[in-house]
């Protein structure tokens, strides 16, 4: 039996110039509106006290991307506000899981989360698709290395 070769051809881009030019476009032009609507609906549900675990996950994803973009230099002057928003969301989610998935915010947490979402929206307006892809790579890398805070399920 013959030994299997380790050679694997690299994928080729059909149009490299279009790929580069699309990477330079702002994310706001790329049809990110659907994702922003999901994020804002999740914030609204959280504000009303009707949030589900899926809504919390949408907000967590947005805040993870927000932190990664700040690491890349997009709105990096708001690091303290980003940290406060993440801490507020973590505390509310932890409390909600312990209360049987009933997510209720305190006033200071709501203010911090709203400010965090405003920062995220501003980042999306000024960032390019290539920068957003780098941010997504940072988020996935942190997830693989298990460096993220985990909201554990209630054990009873």
Image (tube, rainbow, N blue to C red):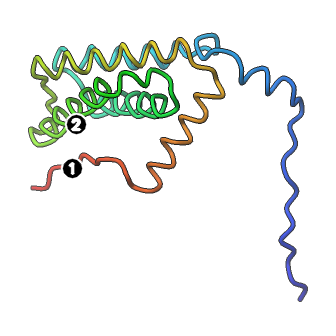
Q: Nearer the viewer, residue 151 or 137?
A: 137
Element carrying mark 1: loop
Label 2 vs 1, first from the N-terminus:
2
Seen in the picture, residue 111 relative to 53 is either above or below; the reply is above
Query: Do labels 2 and 1 touch, CB within 8 Å?
Result: no
Task: Give the spatial CA distance, label 2 vs label 1.
Answer: 13 Å
Q: Residue at x 12, y 39 (%)?
A: 100
Element carrying mark 2: helix
Disc sitting over residue 116 in the figure: none
Q: Residue at x 35, y 22 (%)?
A: 78
Q: Nearer the viewer, residue 61 or 99?
A: 61
Seen in the picture, residue 28 relative to 101 is either above or below; the reply is above
The residue that disc 2 covers is 90
Q: Foreground mark, 2 or 1?
A: 2
Q: Residue at x 85, y 52 (%)?
A: 10
Q: Residue at x 28, y 48 (%)?
A: 150
Residue 85 spot, x, y in % from top left: 26, 26
Q: In this image, 99 relative to 116: left or right? A: left
Q: In this image, 73 relative to 58: left or right? A: right
Q: Quadrant of the N terminus?
A: bottom right
Based on the displayed image, in which of its 4 quarters is residue 122 positioned?
top left
Dot 1: few (<14), some (14–19), or many (≥20) neighbours within 10 Å?
few
Q: Quadrant of the C terminus?
A: bottom left
Residue 102 spot, x, y in % from top left: 14, 31
Disc sitting over residue 153 in the figure: 1
Q: In this image, 85 relative to 126: left or right? A: left
Based on the displayed image, in which of its 4 quarters is residue 39 positioned?
top left
Based on the displayed image, in which of its 4 quarters is residue 75 positioned?
top left
Residue 14 spot, x, y in % from top left: 89, 33
């Amino acid at each position: 039996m013959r030994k299997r070769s380790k050679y694997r051809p690299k994928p080729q881009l059909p149009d490299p110039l279009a790929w580069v030019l699309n990477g330079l476009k702002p994310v706001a032009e790329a049809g990110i509106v659907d994702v922003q609507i999901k994020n804002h609906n999740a914030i609204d549900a959280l504000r009303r006290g009707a949030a589900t675990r899926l809504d919390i996950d949408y907000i967590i994803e947005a805040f993870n991307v927000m932190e990664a973009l700040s690491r890349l230099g997009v709105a990096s002057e708001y690091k303290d506000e980003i940290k406060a928003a993440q801490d507020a969301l973590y505390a509310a989610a932890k409390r909600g899981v312990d209360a049987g998935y009933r997510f209720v915010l305190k006033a200071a947490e709501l203010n911090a989360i709203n400010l965090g979402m405003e920062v995220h929206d501003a980042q999306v307006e000024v960032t390019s698709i290539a920068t957003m892809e780098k941010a997504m790579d940072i988020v996935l890398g942190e997830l693989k290395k298990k460096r993220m805070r985990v909201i554990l399920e209630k054990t009873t």
